[in-house]
Every structure is written in C-alpha cells, then in structure tokens.
Amino acid sequence: MLSSPAIITAMRQKKFILPESEIPARWYNIMADMKQLPQPMLNPKTHEPVKAEDLYHLFCKACSDQELDTVNRWIDIPEAVREKYSYWRCTPLVRAYGLEEALGTPAHIYFKNESVSPIGSHKLNSALAQAYYCSQEGISNITTETGAGQWGAALSYAAKVFGLECAVYQVRISYEQKPYRKSMMQAFGAQVTPSPSMSTRAGKDILTACPHHQGSLGTAISEAVELATTTPNCRYTLGSVLNHVALHQTVIGLEAEKQMALAGEYPDIVIACFGGGSNFGGLAFPFLRHTLTEGTKTRYIAAEPASCPKLTKGEFRYDYGDESGYTPLIPMFTLGHDFQPANIHAGGLRYHGAGAIVSQLLKDSLIEAVDIRQLDSFKAGLLFARTEGIIPAPESCHAIAAAVGEALGCKERGEKKVILFNLSGHGLVDMSAYDQYLSGSMSNTGD
C-alpha cells in the first residue's frame, strides 16, 4: 500500500510519481498468461524448434532462457539492475492537460515519461539487464545494432557500467542523419560503425549487391550477429523484437498501473509507437494481463510508420530477423527480411517485422495497429511540444499522433475515455528532423 503522502488531492494534479521503493522487483512474462502461445522460433539450419541451448552461442544464457520461458509469470529483477534503475525510476506518469485543452476533447490523456532516463529513452531498461547478465557469465564483449541510436546509446552506457566492451552497428542513414547519437555512443566508450559496412561478410555482400544501400535494422543486425558469433567471448544483444527484451521493459507498465490507480482512473486505450515491439510491450503487457485473466475491455494500439507497415500491411509467416538470414526464423508479421524502408527520421521504427508475442496477439485480435504518415507524426509531435513542453523523439511522435486521433474521436462522439500512451524518448538529439519539418522540406516519401 502506498503511503498517504504519495497521494495528492489537488483537483488538477498533473504528475503522478512513485517513490523509489515502488520500483518493480519482478518483470512480467505475458507468455505465462497467453491462451494461444506464439509458434516456436525455428533453427535456421534444421528448421526444428529452437531450444534455449541453441541460442547460447548468440545471447547470454540468462536471456536465452528468458526468451523461451512460457511458465514463470514473474521473473526477479537482479538487485544490481534494480539499483541502477533507481537512478531515474520510477518515471513520472503525467496528465496531459495542455494537450487535452488544445484538442477540446473530453478524453483524459496520460503519458508515461520514459524520456527522463540518463540516455533519454526507455531502452536503458533492457540494456542494463542484458549487460548485467553478460558480465555475470564472464562475457567481455557485446555487440548490437541500432537505428536512430537510442538503443545503441543505452547499451553503450550499460556496457560501461558493467565493465564490458561494446561495438555498435548503426543504420547508415541514421548514422548520417543523427551524428550526435553516434557521439553519445562514443562518449560512453563504444565503437560505432555505419551499416552496411565492409567490416563483415554480411556487410560486404549487401554492398556488393546494392552499393548505395542506406541500411536498415535488418542489415545492422546481420553485421552485429556475425561479429558476435565470430569473436571470442562476445555475445549479441538486441534492443527490441525478442521476448526477453519486452520482458525487461514491463517495468514501464507495472509502474503505470500503480500510477493510474493514484490518478483514480484506468485506461480505456493504451498506445505506444511500434518498431519491433519493446516499448509497446513494456507499457501494454502489464495491462494486457488483466484482459487475458479478467476480461478487461481495454484497447491496445500499436502505432507504426506508414512507410514500414508490418502490422497493418505485412504478411504473417516465418521470417528471419535480419537481412542475411543469420538469426532464427521468427513467426511474425513481416514485410520481408530484405525490405528496404524509406529514409524516415523515426529510425527506431524502420524494421521489417514484429516480435512473435505481438504478432500472436494481433492474430488473436487482442491488440490493434495503425499506421501514421511522417508529416502527421511530426505535426502531432509539435503540438505536444507546444502544449506539454517536451520535444518528443520522432518515434514517440507516432504514439502521440495515434493518441490525438483517438482523443479527437472521443470529441466527435462525446465520449469521456481515458487514454494512456508511452513517451518513449525525447527528441533533443533529433532537431535536424524538426528543422526539416518546420522549413517545409520534409515529405511523406515511402508512405
């Protein structure tokens, strides 16, 4: 039970903050409650269902075991990770009064502010966990991919915290569009390489076939996986898509549950932007457990870019998680692992497929998806900045645009709904994108 000083009775209380003691002690594993489990990942060579030990050469053992765990509903957060969480968690839940008033909506809009983390996004929740587990297993080097750079920055910092060396392959177009994200990673001591590159066989093959390839998360994953599997005492770490990543992110929704209770409300609609599924799952899965076990009627909306619409226009089938076919085959909604997304500024959402859990939930009609055009996302992001005082990351702009759409729908119908969305990160390292939007030089290319 929360102490009474944590409960403020002001009529227009805007911010709901939990004390450090309320940081979740366990992550929530939604697979333990799913009526219909995702189909198994398949070994890319044998096409047999993957076992945990099949992943040990790629991921650390703890994450491999978590990836396939369908039994344990709650998984303890290591105390060393929880202690690092305390540097910024619990993150605030905020009532967006300014946005509500600008829209003239009867809806109540709340956002979970993950932009207050040391690196400015939610990605650190899983980066610290993965780096900790690797350090505990005696692994000395870790490698990964990154799009816009939030995940790369998070892992670079987490690696430094736990004494690991980190190599990051950043999607080339984002490497060029967002130079300060590269600088952030280098400031934390990581080696950063634009992908595709000539440093791996996968990169060479991609560039040979397409010399001007601007990169995708699929190309960067291929290079990172190759480096991890050919370098002694090195493991691959992933920032989205896979089950164990969404697991680590559930601290977001678990905190938000308690904070919504402080606000005296419960969300009718839960929204997050969608690239591979980490921040969507992090916010939505803890609330979804009540839908799965108690039948609550909350709607869950994943907001993806119209130029990379795997959930709204993709095909459900087995596909590789990377462009070169190094990863296990994943049952997913996909645009094809060789899909080349448009050069939109929401680099973290430029991924061809959806995680297995989210894909299964969409198949079972437990969640919904919308696609957002780039100009519409920045229009919503600018409105949010001007009404709430936070410049959102281009990825988060998609969630804001979806929330605005739902709030305006409530206005048209005269419905007083409660909307909760995840502000997954700030956009202070993305100002060149806002410059383009404000100057009128941005387009909806690829939508």
Image: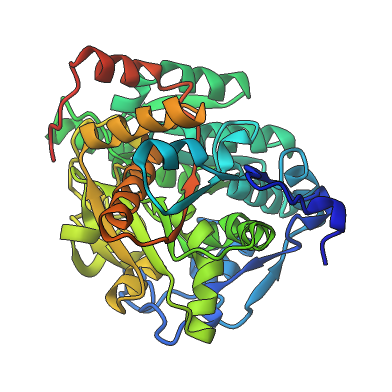
* Picture residue at 36% right of the left edge, 70% below the top: 43
User: Which scheme is used to colour this image of the protein?
Assistant: rainbow
Q: Looking at the figure, which quarter contains the C terminus? A: top left
Q: Is residue 271 above or below residue 198?
A: below
Q: Is residue 82 left or right of residue 406?
A: right
Is residue 198 visible from the viewing direction of this image?
no
Q: Quadrant of residue 162?
A: top right
Q: Position of residue 290 (x, y in %)?
A: 54, 78
* Picture residue at 35% right of the left edge, 40% below the top: 103
Q: Is residue 168 left or right of residue 253?
A: left
Q: Position of residue 38 (x, y in %)?
A: 38, 77
Q: How many marks?
A: 0
- The answer to which of 408 and 441 lies nearer the viewer is 408
Q: Is residue 373 above or below residue 290?
A: above
Q: Position of residue 120 (x, y in %)?
A: 57, 32
* Picture residue at 60% right of the left edge, 54% below the top: 252
Q: Looking at the figure, which quarter contains the N terminus? A: bottom right
Q: Position of residue 65 (x, y in %)?
A: 59, 70
Q: Is residue 52 above or below residue 281?
A: below
* Picture residue at 78% right of the left edge, 54% below the top: 7
Is residue 265 visible from the viewing direction of this image?
yes
Q: Is residue 226 left or right of residue 209?
A: right
Q: Is residue 216 above or below residue 28?
A: above
Q: Quadrant of residue 45?
A: bottom left
